[in-house]
Image: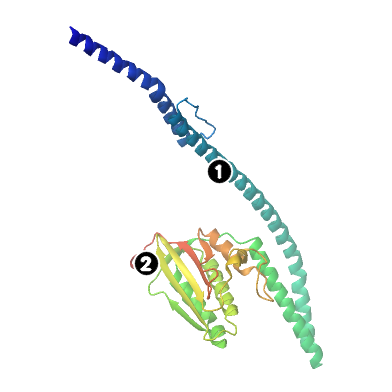
Amino acid sequence: MATVAGIVQFVAIGLGVFAILAIVILRPVRKLLQNMDAVQHGNLDIEADTTGTRELDTLVGGFNGMVARLRNARLSEQEAQRAQMVRVEQLAMIGEMAASLVHEIRNPLSGIKAAVDILAGEEKADEARTILGHVSAELGRVDGVIRQLLNFARPKTPFLAPTDLRDLIAAVVTLMSARAASQKVELTIAVPRPVVVLADAEMVHQVLVNLLINALHALEGAPQPRINVSIAVEDGRAICRVCDNGPGVPADRAEAIFRPFVTTKPRGTGLGLATSARLIDMQNGRLTLANPGQPGACFEFWLPLSDRRSATDTM
């Protein structure tokens, strides 16, 4: 009988201990798990209650601190998104205003240039004809700046189609070879196979021309100047790189150079890289400076590969 009574007493004590554990530990832990599940599903307004147990309250405090940090991070992200939306709306409005203003300026400017060209052709005096020629050239330059501004403010909608990036690069390099030769710049291509991307061929052509022109400007006066254009294929993307051995771009200007009207050239407009970056963005890609702060600028842009596969799979 004593043995039976001892067993009963032991079981009673065990049940009592279990009940205490259920009240003191298991129930708070279960509640904390429910709170964690709520946070996982996006509810960051939740806060776990303290339990009166030091160890568990340490856990509860850590949980509440984590939720508070997540909540602050979400608020900061939402504020940044709101600020970005406001900026986008402002830029869109400025772009429309700029496009309208540019259109109004360009029409009379074209008429003025035509009139100056006629006068230069009829002028007999060499000095006057030279001056009119300079005026016409400056008017042409202004027209080019206005055209760049118009392209930046109101670019056309891209026509995305399977495009062989190797053919585009070859065409642009052929176009720029005479200018490169006049500067004694070695211009090379490293694209051994066709690389078919989903892109607007005209826009990509413009971007390549802009990048090569910038590289040629950077190499003016450089010893043994070189430019290399290459392609790599990674993760379903074609990465095109235009690299030179010029002075490079300082790290603190790596982001600023993609903003409109930021330029290091005395007669630059600061629209070439800004326009190029926007054109690549419109084709679901991105244009960046790969090596800020290092000698020799290396600009790269990536574009998605076309569904129509080519030899790129083995590159």
Circle 2 SS class: helix
Is residue 117 visible in this depiction of the protein?
no
Which dot, 2 or 1, sits closer to the camera?
1
Residue at the extreme top of the image, as rendered: 1
Specify the quadrant of the image occupied by residue 98.
Answer: bottom right
* Residue lying at 57% horizontally and 86% vertically, measured from the top left: 183
| Residue density around tag 1, few if under 14, some if 14–19, many if 20 or more, within 10 Å | few
- The spot of residue 46 in percent (x, y) is 52, 31
Q: Are marks 2 and 1 in contact (CB under 8 Å)?
A: no
Which residue is the site of mark 1?
73
Q: Height in image: 101 above or below 206? A: above
Q: Residues within 10 Å of mark 2 (few under 14, many from 20)?
A: many
Q: Is residue 228 visible?
A: yes
Q: Secondary structure at mark 1?
A: helix
In the rendered image, the quadrant that contains the N terminus is: top left
Q: Tell which of 18 and 142 is nearer to you.
A: 18
The image position of residue 147, as x and y in percent, is 67, 69
At a point 55% along the width and 76% down the height, the residue shown is 212
Note whether 80 is above or below 144 in the view shown. above
Circle 2 residue: 312
Q: Position of residue 159 (x, y in %)?
A: 52, 61
Identify the image's colour scheme: rainbow, by chain, secondary structure or one colour.
rainbow
Query: The C terminus lies in which quarter of the figure?
Result: bottom left
Q: Nearer the viewer, residue 60 or 268?
A: 60
* Left or right: 2 in relation to 219: left
Q: CA distance from mark 2 to mark 1?
A: 41 Å
Instruction: Estimate the x, y position of residue 121 in percent, counting from the top left.
Output: 76, 87
Q: Nearer the viewer, residue 248 or 231?
A: 248
Query: Would you say 127 lies left or right of 25 here?
Result: right
On screen, 182 above or below 146?
A: below
Three-letter amino acid code of the residue under disc 1:
Ala
